[in-house]
Image (tube, rainbow, N blue to C red):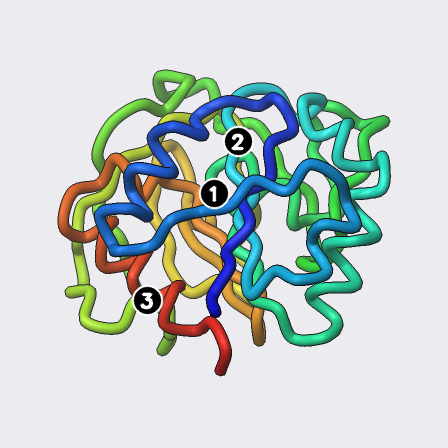
Amino acid sequence: MTSIALIDYGAGNLTSVRKGFAAAGVELSRPRTPPDLAGASAIVVPGVGHFRATSPLANGWRDAILEAVGRGVPLFGICLGLQWLFDSSEEADDVTGLGLMNGRCERLPGVVKVPHVGWNSLALIRPSRLFASVPEGSQVYFTHSYAAPVGADCVAVTTHGRPFAAAVERDNVFGVQFHPEKSGDIGLQVIRNFVATVGK
């Protein structure tokens, strides 16, 4: 039986993420403590706001998530959840990311309006399970001020002042800077594609 765990660390948008997955035919569970992840088939780390909001994840969740990823459980970071996959963010230099993706998240340049709020098109830069059946140039919804670098694990890029990672993927670890639950049919396809990785 598939059990996809939605991590609640107080950083918002749980209701919309639940609705997005429900539209894809999946109900998310809410683990109360890190040991509850032992039975999870997949893990979703959502989030909005300041990088410091990820601090509660250091209290046992970090180790439990890394252990799950190590045994092949798919992990999906959304918005702030994607940024947490990286080493760090200049938004909170004293807060450590999960470190599954190399690099540091940085503020978008002041030559454009920040925060970046609205729809942008995706440039798909390499084959990705997350973007199966998603057309090049698809529009998705963003709201953020900091972004991850375009590195080896980047599978989709968009530009707001500078290019940044719109999505990353490595083995069973996935992340999107945009909000798939607010991105219409394209976002729903991305969610379905993540769900399709569960158990594989």
Which residue ends up furthest to the front in the rendered image? 1
Residue in view at x 85 percent, y 35 percent: 59
Earlier along the polypeptide chain: callout 1 or callout 3?
1
Q: Position of residue 181 (x, y in %)?
A: 29, 40
Q: CA distance from mark 1 to mark 3?
A: 14 Å
Q: CA distance from mark 2 to mark 3?
A: 20 Å
Are the residues tagged 2 and 1 within 8 Å (C-beta)?
yes
Please, what is the three-letter code of the amino acid marked with disc 2? Gly
Report the Cα–Cα distance between label 2 and label 1. 6 Å
Residue 4 as seen in the image, left or right of residue 190: right
Taking 150 as reference, is 10 left or right? Answer: right
Q: Nearer the viewer, residue 36 or 148?
A: 36
Q: Secondary structure at mark 1?
A: strand
Residue wearing tag 2: 47
Q: Secondary structure at mark 3?
A: helix
Mark 2 vs 3, N-terminal side: 2
- Can residue 199 be spotted in the picture? yes
Q: What is the three-letter code of the residue carrying label 1?
A: Ile
Say which quarter of the image contains residue 194. Answer: bottom left
The vertical placement of 172 against 97, above or below, is: below
- Pick the residue in front: 172 or 95: 172
Q: Residues within 10 Å of mark 3 (few under 14, many from 20)?
A: some
**Residue that lies at the very extreme toward the bottom in this rendered image:** 200
Residue at the image position 67 percent from the left and 58 percent from the top: 101
Which label was assigned to residue 193?
3
- The spot of residue 111 in percent (x, y) is 40, 20
Disc ID at residue 78: 1
Identify the residue shown where x is 56% and y is 43%. 45
Identify the residue shown where x is 55% and y is 34%.
Answer: 80
**Sequence-first tag of 2 and 1:** 2
On the picture, is 46 further left or further right than 86? left
